[in-house]
Image: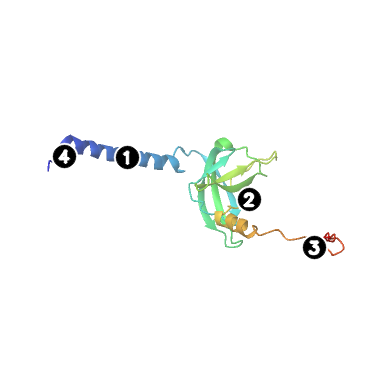
Amino acid sequence: MTQPRRSFQVGTGLFILLGFAALAYLATQTTSVANYTEGDSYTLKAKFSNIGQLKQRAPVKLAGVRIGSVKSIALDPQSLEALVTIGIDTRFKDIPDDSGAAIFTSGLLGDQYVGVQPGGSPVAFKDGDEFILTQSSMQLEDLIGKFLVSGDTPKKPANAATPTTDDVEPAAKNP
């Protein structure tokens, strides 16, 4: 049996290292930590009945543009809802105070983020304000369950007429 050449071993090792480097690069570029440098910001709060898999440092987006990140997530002891503290970059200081916040998912099974839907008020949010209009996370399991439960056969309406013997024509007699 012959021994493999040393250059083949070195080439294989380099190929494996490049593969791991590519995976590490992709992992950092697809997470919410990448491509966002945080500057001065102000905080807003929002309460949700269900935040799903929302995490700290998750992006906050307006019209698909990242404007901030989730600072903290806690349980409000009075309302028993998730209290999400959001940091918004001060460049985006003119968000109307009647805007809404919703939790969305990137793709079918991607990371979750907070989406801001702007309102029409001339008054802007101030540091420490709270979103009044919020929409909780839609859980894939709940959607599948609703689809399966509502998938039964349609029922006959109560006012539908049932055929009687008067409505049926008599069969032709053979001579």
Q: Which quadrant does the N terminus fall into?
A: top left
User: Residue, x 53% and y 39% (percent of image)?
Assistant: 66
> Hey, what amino acid is under mark 4?
Pro
**Disc 3 designates what residue?**
158
Up/down of 126 relative to 147, above or below = above
Q: Is residue 126 visible?
A: no
Q: CA distance from mark 3 to mark 2?
A: 39 Å
Q: Earlier in the sequence, mark 3 or mark 4?
A: 4
* Disc ID at residue 19: 1
**Secondary element at image label 4:** loop
- How far from the left and from the top, in percent, is residue 86? 54, 47
Q: Earlier in the sequence, mark 3 or mark 1?
A: 1
In the orientation shown, which residue stands out farthest toward the left?
Answer: 1
Q: CA distance from mark 1 to mark 2?
A: 42 Å
> Hey, what amino acid is under mark 3?
Ala
In the image, 99: left or right of 52? right
Q: Is residue 156 visible?
A: yes
Q: CA distance from mark 3 to mark 4?
A: 82 Å
Q: Are marks 3 and 1 in contact (CB under 8 Å)?
A: no
- How far from the left and from the top, in percent, is residue 164? 84, 64
Give 28 or 129, whichever is nearer the viewer. 28
**Disc 4 designates what residue?**
4
Q: How many numbered circles are shown?
A: 4
In the image, 172: left or right of 108? right
Q: Residues within 10 Å of mark 4 (few under 14, many from 20)?
A: few
Q: Earlier in the sequence, mark 1 or mark 2?
A: 1
The mark lying in front, picked from 3 and 4, is: 3
> Hey, what amino acid is under mark 2?
Thr
Q: Residues within 10 Å of mark 1 (few under 14, many from 20)?
A: few
**Disc 2 designates what residue?**
134
